[in-house]
Amino acid sequence: MLSFRIIFVILILVGLIQADVEEGKQLFHEASCLECHNYEDFGSKTTKIKMFKALEDRVQACQLSESDELFDDEVHDIAKYLNKEFYKLKK
Ligand code: HEC
């Protein structure tokens, strides 16, 4: 019985993570990111970004420069999306 509960909780957590990534993907496409970037910009071998925190900071810096006016959790979701899709960094 207990193991069913554990599996249930894990499924919910996975669902929540997935929701963040989906949200991030949508925000990324709504914001002005692709005015300056194309997909090859992200996670290339020459990138200086080696940590998730650095990725998040970079998204924050970019969105401020373009005054997309995203909330911190939206910046976080975009970083999660970019990480899952391109960077694959550990947290
Ligand atoms: C006005 C142009 C501009 C816009 C709009 C912009 N960026 Fe950037 N972005 C840059 C520039 C320039 C760099 C390179 C900075 C450097 O490497 O020093 C960069 C770098 C990055 C990087 C690091 C790339 C790498 O791996 O080296 C990420 C990630 C990024 N931007 C995400 C975003 C996101 C997400 C958005 C939308 C919210 C966005 N940017 C909007 C200009 C822009």
Image (cartoon, grey):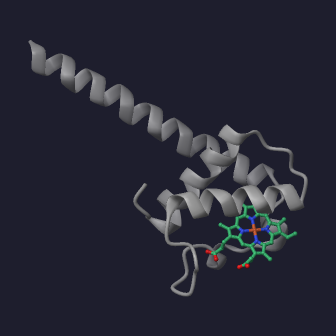
Residue that extends furthest to the top in the rendered view of this protein: 1
**Quadrant of residue 21 within the rendered picture:** top right
Q: Quadrant of the C terminus?
A: bottom left
Residue that extends furthest to the bottom in the rendered view of this protein: 46
- What residue lies at 69% left-to-right and 48% top-to-bottom? 75
Q: Is residue 16 above or below residue 72?
A: above
Work out whether residue 30 or residue 82 is closer to the camera in this orientation and state it: 82
Q: Is residue 31 above or below residue 35?
A: above
- Residue 60: x percent and y percent? 73, 55
- What residue lies at 57% left-to-right and 43% top-to-bottom? 22
- What residue lies at 11% left-to-right and 15% top-to-bottom? 2
Work out whether residue 49 or residue 5 is closer to the camera in this orientation and state it: 49
Figure quadrant, ligand 1 = bottom right
Q: Is residue 19 above or below residue 82?
A: above
For this view, does 78 lie left or right of residue 14? right
Q: Quadrant of the N terminus?
A: top left
Count of picture labels: 0
For this view, does 61 lie left or right of residue 68? left
Q: Is residue 86 above or below residue 16?
A: below
**Quadrant of residue 5 within the rendered picture:** top left
- Residue 52: x percent and y percent? 51, 59
- Residue 23: x percent and y percent? 62, 40
- What residue lies at 42% left-to-right and 32% top-to-bottom? 15
